[in-house]
């Protein structure tokens, strides 16, 4: 039987269900349960939908949402790298590239190429859409950690300087959200949940 677009698409859909099993270090808001990558991707997409008016530049919201829904799919194969990991780089790796080719490659060729291109655009972080999507990706864990009295910052001994350095990318997508985030970081230091 010839492989149809539908059967390829359904294989991809079944494969990406595995994203629900990839646990992140951050915990859900006001919780001690780790978030999984699927929850993270859904939450970021909803955040973008709600917060798009604060983007520095007009953006194609559908493209932003596509980026946020697929940006961590490579972690099915490559695993989640903690943003503050000192042993392994959080930047795009060859391992993630191989994962992107395999997982998106389950789709019909045109769809596979489109999603790989969108994933690459997010990783490069240069377009208005990628900048805003990355703003969402850095904002959510900040909100989670403040809701959990320091969360992974305290658990892994992450200092204000390291958090600030990683969170600065927020301003590339939204100056307004960065102002809020910067104040939240300063408040976290004042409240003793983030150490300088």
Image (cartoon, rainbow, N blue to C red):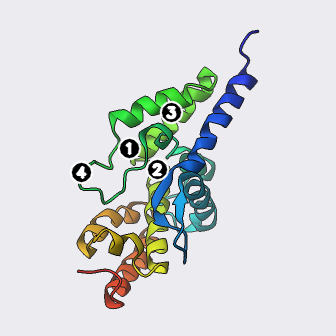
User: Counting residues from the N terminus, which is met first, the one under dot 3 or under dot 2?
Assistant: 3
- Residue at horizontal 43 percent and vertical 54 percent from the top: 131
Q: Which mark is residue 87?
A: 4
User: Counting residues from the N terminus, which is met first, the one under dot 3 or under dot 1?
Assistant: 3
Q: Nearer the viewer, mark 4 or mark 2?
A: 4
21 above or below 39?
above
88 above or below 138?
above
The residue to which callout 1 is attached is: 124
Q: What SS does tag 3 mark?
A: helix
Circles 2 and 1, Cβ within 8 Å, touching? The answer is yes
The residue to which callout 3 is attached is: 116
**How many angstroms separate mark 4 from mark 1 (CA)?**
22 Å
Q: Nearer the viewer, mark 3 or mark 2?
A: 3
Q: Nearer the viewer, mark 4 or mark 1?
A: 4
Q: What SS does tag 4 mark?
A: loop
- Residue at horizontal 61 percent and vertical 35 percent from the top: 15
Residue 36 at x, y = what percent? 54, 56
Looking at the image, residue 6 sits to the left or right of residue 133; the answer is: right
- Residue at horizontal 35 percent and vertical 71 percent from the top: 155
User: Counting residues from the N terminus, which is met first, the one under dot 4 or under dot 1?
Assistant: 4
Quarter location, residue 113: top right
Question: Is residue 64 in view?
Answer: no
Circles 3 and 2, Cβ within 8 Å, touching? The answer is no
**Few, some or many C-alpha atoms within 10 Å of disc 2 (few <14, some 14-19, many ≥20)?**
many
Looking at the image, residue 122 sits to the left or right of residue 92; the answer is: right
Residue 193 at x, y = what percent? 35, 83
**Few, some or many C-alpha atoms within 10 Å of disc 3 (few <14, some 14-19, many ≥20)?**
many
């Amino acid at each position: 039987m010839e492989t149809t677009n539908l059967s390829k698409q359904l294989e991809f859909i079944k494969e990406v269900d595995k994203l629900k099993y990839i646990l992140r270090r951050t915990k859900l808001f006001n919780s001690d349960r780790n978030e999984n990558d699927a929850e993270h991707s859904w939450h970021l997409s909803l955040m973008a939908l709600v917060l798009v008016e604060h983007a520095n530049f007009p953006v194609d919201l559908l493209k932003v949402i596509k980026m946020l829904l697929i940006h961590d799919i490579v972690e099915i194969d490559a695993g989640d790298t903690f943003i503050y990991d000192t042993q392994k780089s959080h930047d795009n790796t060859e391992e993630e590239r191989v994962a992107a080719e395999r997982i998106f490659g389950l789709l019909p060729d045109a769809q596979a190429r489109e999603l790989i291109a969108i994933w690459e655009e997010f990783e490069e972080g240069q377009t208005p859409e990628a900048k805003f999507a990355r703003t969402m990706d850095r904002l959510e864990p900040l909100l989670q950690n403040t809701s959990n009295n320091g969360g992974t910052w305290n658990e892994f001994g992450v200092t204000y300087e390291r958090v600030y350095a990683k969170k600065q990318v927020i301003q590339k997508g939204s100056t307004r959200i960065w102002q809020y985030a910067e104040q939240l970081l300063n408040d976290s230091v004042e409240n003793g949940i983030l150490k300088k």
